[in-house]
Amino acid sequence: MIPLLHLGMIFLGSTYGENPEMMSDKFIGGSPYGPSTIAGSDGSRQPAEEDLNMASTLAKRVARVARGLNQIVGDGQFFKIQFLWKCADCVSAKSYRTHHDRPE
């Protein structure tokens, strides 16, 4: 994994706050490292609804971060990605600045 970091890769996992399924006592896959499923040795067990929810939540998070990284300010610096976690309703740097009265 370390060589991937040197190439600029960003790792995103699943957070406990976005995935209450991880805190349940049901027999499901998934961890803070990412969604998974427990299929059994013969693959007969299908993903549970909770497993699919965790995968969907991570997919949305990856899309938000990718959208945020695509927003580059004029001086070439990336807009601070913290806006993605501070306001779930803001889907871009521009909407965050507008929604929170930030100067352009």
Image (spheres, helix red, strand yellow):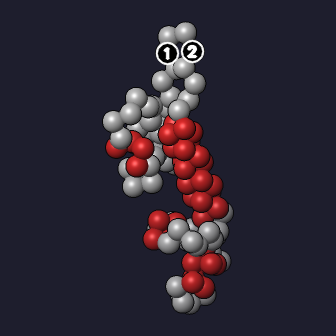
Element carrying mark 1: loop
User: What x and y, as percent, mark residue 79?
Assistant: 56, 71
Rendered residue at 54%/38% (across/down): 49
Rendered residue at 46%/45% (across/down): 13
Q: Is residue 75 above or below residue 14?
A: below
User: What x and y, as percent, mark residue 21?
Assistant: 42, 44
Tag count: 2
Q: Nearer the viewer, residue 79 or 90?
A: 90
Rendered residue at 54%/89% (across/down): 101
User: What x and y, as percent, mark residue 47?
Assistant: 56, 29
Kind of residue sitting beneath label 1? Gly
Q: Is residue 5 visible?
A: no
Element carrying mark 2: loop
The C terminus lies in quadrant = bottom right
Q: Which residue is mark 2?
A: 43
User: What x and y, as percent, mark residue 22?
Assistant: 39, 42
Decide: few, some or many residues near mark 2? Use Cα within 10 Å; few <14, some 14-19, many ≥20: few
Q: Is residue 20 above or below residue 41?
A: below
- Disc 2 versus disc 1: distance between alpha carbons? 5 Å
Residue furthest out toward the top: 42
Decide: few, some or many residues near mark 1? Use Cα within 10 Å; few <14, some 14-19, many ≥20: few
Q: Is residue 73 visible?
A: yes
Q: Nearer the viewer, residue 30 or 10?
A: 30
Kind of residue sitting beneath label 2? Gly
Q: Say the numbered circle drawn on residue 79.
A: none
Circles 2 and 1 in contact, beta carbons < 8 Å = yes
Left or right: 1 as drawn, with respect to 95: left
Q: Which residue is mark 1?
A: 40
